[in-house]
Amino acid sequence: PEPEVAAPAESEGGDDLGNADEAIRFLRQMIPDLILLDLNMRHVNGMEMLGFLKRNKRTTHVPVVMVSVNDQPEAIQKAYNAGAVGYLVKPVSIEKLESILERILES
């Protein structure tokens, strides 16, 4: 089942999706090569969305990198246990992003 979310907000344009509703609509039309997923999304918890992505046949194979201000080891481990392939702490360093992307491309 899809995560329960509130009414959709207006799209902010491009592929920068503002909430889970927009993300789900986007994923029905196109499957990206990589998903950067904020842990604190509007209307739904990012961990719930990660679970949805990993249970969904269309998106289970897509690498998901979590992005959050939360740098607690427990939160990071929880994301990896749920299927994330990377975890970036805000503010995101370009070096860490490049490192994660290189690791994904090598696998």
Image (tube, rainbow, N blue to C red):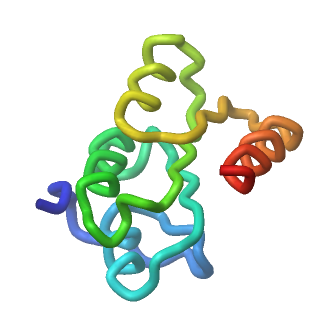
Residue 71 vertical position relative to residue 45 in the rendered view, above or below: above
Asked if 19 appears above or below 89 in the picture, the reply is: below
Q: Between residues 61 and 97, which one lies in front from this camera angle? A: 61
Q: Position of residue 56 (x, y in %)?
A: 25, 63
In this image, 7 relative to 42: left or right? left
Residue 81 location, x and y as percent?
38, 28
* Left or right of 97, for residue 47: left
Tell me if I can see residue 43 in this picture: no
**In front here: 9 or 106?**
106
The quarter of the rendered structure image containing the N terminus is bottom left
Give the residue at x 36% y 59%.
Answer: 60
Location of residue 71 by image quarter: top right
Residue at the spot 62% in from the left edge and 80% down from the top edge: 14
Q: Residue furthest front?
A: 107
- Residue drawn at the location 77% of the way across and 44% of the way down: 97
Q: Position of residue 24 (x, y in %)?
A: 32, 71
Residue 5 position by quadrant: bottom left
Would you say 13 lies left or right of 29 here? Answer: right
Answer yes or no: is residue 51 visible: yes
Residue 78: quarter of image: top left
